[in-house]
Image (cartoon, rainbow, N blue to C red):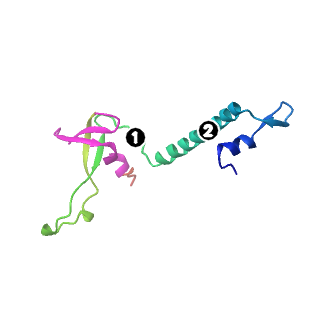
Amino acid sequence: MLLSGADYNKSTLLDTEDGTQTGELTRNESFKKMFIDVRQGLETANQKSCDRYNLRRRHVELLPNQLVWRKNYVLSDATKYFSQKLAPKHVGPFLVHKRISLWTYELRDLQGTAKGVWNLKDLKPAEDIYPDETT
């Protein structure tokens, strides 16, 4: 087990063309090898982290005039005997009017009234809510 750079320097041997190891690496060679090993480790860790982060991201691009449902954000109100838990999770349908950025879209209702700008995480294409009804 390597505990410091000095241990790493002593443990690395120079490979020859016939596969045998001879002598210790010079200080510069050992730093180059250590640098390459660290870089490979960082790239591997970065890729694993990227895969884990993007695991549940929906790769969806909405088109203008596409029907979508938006997430319903309401608060419970005990004075009106209303529980947020029992409210509908999504409301709509709405039409995508235009794309503002990669993650935000401007919505309009079916009559053409503007309903604000919403993040993609709060939108679902209408066909995802109700699958094809063949009956």
Front position in the image: 86 or 16: 16
Q: Number of numbered discs present?
A: 2
Disc 1 is placed on an element classified as: loop
Q: Nearer the viewer, mark 1 or mark 2?
A: 2
Q: Is residue 115 magenta?
A: yes
Residue 96 left/right relative to 17: left
Q: Secondary structure at mark 2?
A: helix
Structural distance between the alpha carbons of marks 1 and 2: 32 Å
Q: Is residue 60 magenta?
A: no
Relative depth, front residue between 51 and 62 = 51
Q: Position of residue 126 (x, y in %)?
A: 32, 46
- Label disc, if present, on residue 60 of the rendered structure: 1
Picture layout, residue 64 above or below residue 123: above
* Percent coordinates x, y for residue 103 in the rendering: 34, 39
In the rendered image, residue 54, in percent from the top left (x then y), is placed at: 47, 45
Q: Position of residue 72 (x, y in %)?
A: 25, 53
Going 36% across and 46% down the picture, which residue do you hit? 127
Q: Quadrant of residue 61?
A: top left
Left or right, residue 83 beside residue 41? left
N-term mark: 1 or 2: 2
Residue at the extreme left: 79
Mark 1 closeness class: few <14, some 14–19, many ≥20 residues within 10 Å: few
Three-letter amino acid code of the residue under disc 2: Gln
Mark 2 neighbour density, 10 Å: few (under 14) some (14–19) many (20 or more): few
In the displayed structure, would residue 118 be above or below residue 98?
below
Q: Nearer the viewer, residue 82 or 38?
A: 38
Q: Which residue is mark 2?
A: 40
Look at the image and tell me in which quarter the C terminus lies: bottom left
Name which quarter of the figure residue 105 lies in.
Answer: top left
For the record, the magenta segment spans: 100-129
Type of the residue with mark 1: Val
Residue at 65%, 38% in the rendered image: 34
